[in-house]
Image (cartoon, helix red, strand yellow):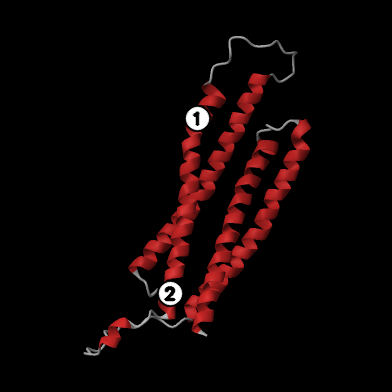
Amino acid sequence: MKQRNVVRTIYLYLVTVVGIVMALTGLIGAITNVLNMYVFRLITSDSMQNELASLLSFASAVAVGVPVWLYHWDIIQETRQHAPKLATAPAAVTNEPIAATMPPQPEARRDLIRRLYIYLLSAIGLFIVMFNLINIAPDVYRAFFMSLSPVTTPVQPNITGPASLNNTYAIQSLIRNIVAVLVGTPVWLYHWHLGQREHRDPLGN
């Protein structure tokens, strides 16, 4: 029975990680597509259908990932509230060597799995923030400060030239990086503070 409880705990946290990663990926993509298409008008009419299909794909990832994450996280929290607390009373002094080689309790193993989950999601959120912050400055330069080539092909009025397309791609990348930072920061901070709080108060008192 105790072994089955540990396997169940691993399943719950594993599915929760998959759900939240799917939700984050979909959320970043969906917000980016909405901003590109409807707010900043960076998508041409020729590629609008592809962008709409991409938006529906990202929205589907959010619609699937969020319920999976919340449902299993609610089970985890409810199980943790009703789980027996680890004993804090000092053990009786004994001369028997068997007492020092007792196997870890299932509650301790579940607590270890929970800590791995919390710090894994904290690391995922931090990596999202770090990798996208690195790209913000180059995208700003490419979108607004990069000088145009001195030799350009003439274009007709009201027709977007290659240089404008390059700027558009840089702006789209910049928008995605900013959205990713805004989405990843709360994930990182929430799980980091949760891990620190449980580190100071491992019994959840």
Q: Residue at x 54, y 25 (%)?
A: 142
Q: Residue at x 56, y 70 (%)?
A: 12
Element under disc 2 = helix
Residue designated by label 2 = 109
Residue 190 percent across, percent down from the top left: 46, 58
The quadrant of the picture occupied by the C terminus is bottom left
What's the distance in space between the residues labelled 1 and 2, CA to CA? 45 Å
- Work out whether 104 lies above or below 32: below
- Work out whether 56 lies above or below 20: above
Q: Residue at x 59, y 63 (%)?
A: 69
Q: Amino acid at mark 1?
A: Pro
Element under disc 1 = helix
Count of marks placed on residues: 2
- Crowding at dot 2, Cα within 10 Å, few <14 / some 14-19 / many 20+, comes out as some
Q: Amino acid at mark 2?
A: Arg
Residue 119 percent across, percent down from the top left: 43, 60
Which of discs 1 and 2 lies nearer the camera? The answer is 2
Horizontal side of residue 65 vs 181, given as left or right: right
Q: Residue at x 54, y 24 (%)?
A: 144
Residue designated by label 1 = 138
Residue 90 percent across, percent down from the top left: 26, 84
- Crowding at dot 1, Cα within 10 Å, few <14 / some 14-19 / many 20+, comes out as some
Q: Which quarter of the figure has residue 193? A: bottom left
Pointers 1 and 2 in contact (CB under 8 A)?
no
